[in-house]
Amino acid sequence: MASATQSEPAPHPSTDTNVVNIGTRRSTLAQVQARAVEKALRDAFPDRTYNICAILAQGDKDKITPLQQLSQGDNAKSLWTGELESMLEEGELDIIVHCLKDMPTQLPDNLALGAILAREDPRDALIVSPRLPKGTHLNTLPKDATIGTSSVRRAAQLRRLYPSLRFADLRGNVGTRLAKLDAEDSPYSAIILAAAGLKRLGMEDRISQYLSSDNGGMLYAVGQGALAIEIRKDDETMKKMLQSIRCERSSRACSAERALLRYLEGGCSVPIGIETSWRGGKGVATGVEPARDYDKDGQAIEEAGPHLDDQELVLKTIVVSVDGKDSVEYESVRKVRSVEEAETMGRDIAKILIERGADKILEKIHTEKQWAAKKQLEAGIANP
Ligand SMILES: NCc1[nH]cc(CCC(=O)O)c1CC(=O)O
């Protein structure tokens, strides 16, 4: 049923219903991630047109105010994604591609987490200065080595297990952080980055040590390594399209992690480490996690490995005080047959952590944060 109007030039993207406008931040990593999502959508829906819109975020502009204070806004819009979310609400964008790790656990009322994609390697990684031997590990670093990181979670966990290490602030995107480590006069002996980001940028050869509960004793951030898509809550078209690129396995694991964090009322700067894995189940374990367990109609895809519903989710977690001196750890194993069951597991673990003293650690961090913010106000430094 061809009509004359169909051969006319496409209208402005925001008014053309065939165009999917994809929003992302402007860093190289963010753009690589957005292109990966675009490709996945294009493979599933080749008839639609895709347009990537890369925005410079407030958090990318202000590199001076400590991250902990920058993230103290009283609205649900995050520092990193506020502008993008406004554009999504206005209909200028149809989806935003995020690192799940950077997404607040509470979203603005009219927006929703549309999909969690197959998780990349969620581990943190140690990258050492070119002045040190290749393959240097945490326990072979010089005694008084300085680690560059602005992550309270990373520093607190390392302080706990490696009390002789020193820490210095290090911010900027992945490329900037590596350049600061490699600089001739660099104050850092090593830095910690998410393995996922390095892998997506093709720079995993810089990794000296992959960190985990049984290698270095480091747990990762909630949601680390997974990409997530934010949509308008009422956008049924996008919801349906995202069914074909989401990953059930990663959705269950990450939803458990996020429910735990939401219950603890964390935030990206609170030292909560986490590690999730799957074990057991019938079938031949391939050693490779199936990338996707359900097809776009929600039908289970047969895999060589054990079926997800037959497996158990193992969740390890730690809440650490900033100085590394207090900590609460917990490990739990449960069958979770849906995202909802995974969220229940996360909340149950949060309650146990609180019973075991995590509330005291979090309370202290909260008070110290408020104190720092008050000091800043008194000194006349306004937060943007
Ligand atoms: N804090 C910024 C950030 N957000 C997500 C990633 C890595 C990629 C991911 O977790 O998917 C990074 C960089 C890092 O921590 O090294």
Image (cartoon, helix red, strand yellow):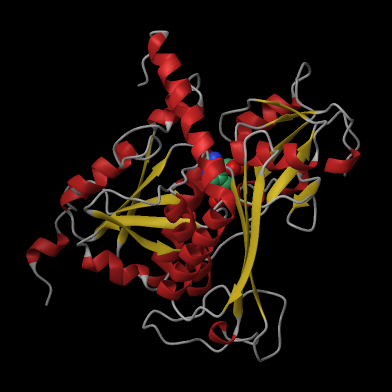
Q: Nearer the viewer, residue 151 or 360?
A: 360
Q: Looking at this view, is 290 or 308 the one in front?
A: 308
Q: How many numbered dots are placed on residues in this image?
A: 0
Q: Is residue 222 left or right of residue 321?
A: left
Q: Measured along the vertical axis of the image, is residue 283 above or below residue 30?
A: below
Q: Residue at x 69, y 38 (%)?
A: 324
Is residue 97 shown above or below 243?
A: above
Place of residue 26 in the rendered image (x, y in percent of width and height, measured from the top left): 44, 37
Place residue 228 in its image quadrant. bottom left
Mark yes or no: residue 42 visible.
yes
Q: Nearer the viewer, residue 167 or 328?
A: 328
Across and down, in percent, residue 178 comes to 68, 32
x 35%, y 21%: residue: 384
Residue shown at 78% from the left, 43% from the top:
161
**Extreme-left residue of the structure:** 4
Quadrant position of ligand 1:
top right
Residue at image point 47% right, 87% down: 300
Residue 136 image offset from top left, x and y in percent = 88, 41
| Left or right: where 147 falls relative to 130 | left
Frontmost residue, 160 versus 3:
160
Residue sitting at the far top: 379
User: In the figure, residue 129 lies in which quadrant?
Assistant: top right
Residue 29 visible in the snapshot = no
